[in-house]
Image: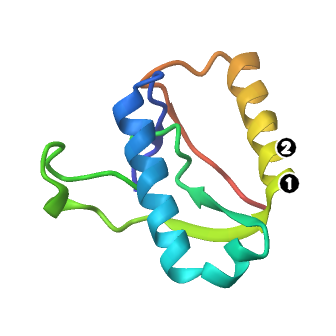
Amino acid sequence: MAPNALTDDDVLIRSRNKNMKDKVCRDQFAAEVAAGKECDEYPFASTREGAGQRKVDSDPKTQIWNFSIWPVIKVHNGAAGNHKQTFEMQYRLLNEDPFWVIVD
């Protein structure tokens, strides 16, 4: 398994990740979304390995279905995202920097 790699503020990659995550979320978790939750995803939307990753970048038919999503409380998701962004800035994770996520 390879490490994740941050993407710079590449609108295409981030938008593709978010759009795929939102589509699957609406399809799989409609009741939770209607109740005010939003889906969180892994790998993160800010990585090249996010929900929108493709084998051939220009071909949507080569979608790599290697991500997970789960409905969470919006405030919690926003707070976690802010914490992650602060970590990335503090430790100077830049575009294309590889990193691992370890869960204890």
In the foreground, 76 or 84: 76
Q: Is residue 37 visible?
A: yes
From the viewer's perspective, is residue 17 above or below residue 91?
A: below
Q: In the image, 60: left or right of 46?
A: left
Residue at image position (73%, 36%) is: 84
Q: Which mark is residue 36?
A: none
* Residue at image mark 2: 79
Relative to residue 78, is residue 29 drawn left or right? left
Badge 2 amino acid: Ala
Q: How many marks?
A: 2
Image location of residue 86, percent across then percent down = 78, 25
Q: Is residue 69 above or below residue 4?
A: below
Q: Residue at x 74, y 41 (%)?
A: 81
| CB-based contact (under 8 Å), mark 2 and mark 1 | yes
* Position of residue 75 in the picture relative to residue 40 (left or right): right
| Occupied quadrant, residue 40 | bottom right
Looking at the rendering, in which quadrant would you find the N terminus?
A: bottom left
Q: Give the image location of residue 25, x and y in percent.
A: 55, 70
Task: Examine the rendered structure and indicate whether residue 28 appears above or below residue 4.
Answer: below
Residue bearing mark 1: 76
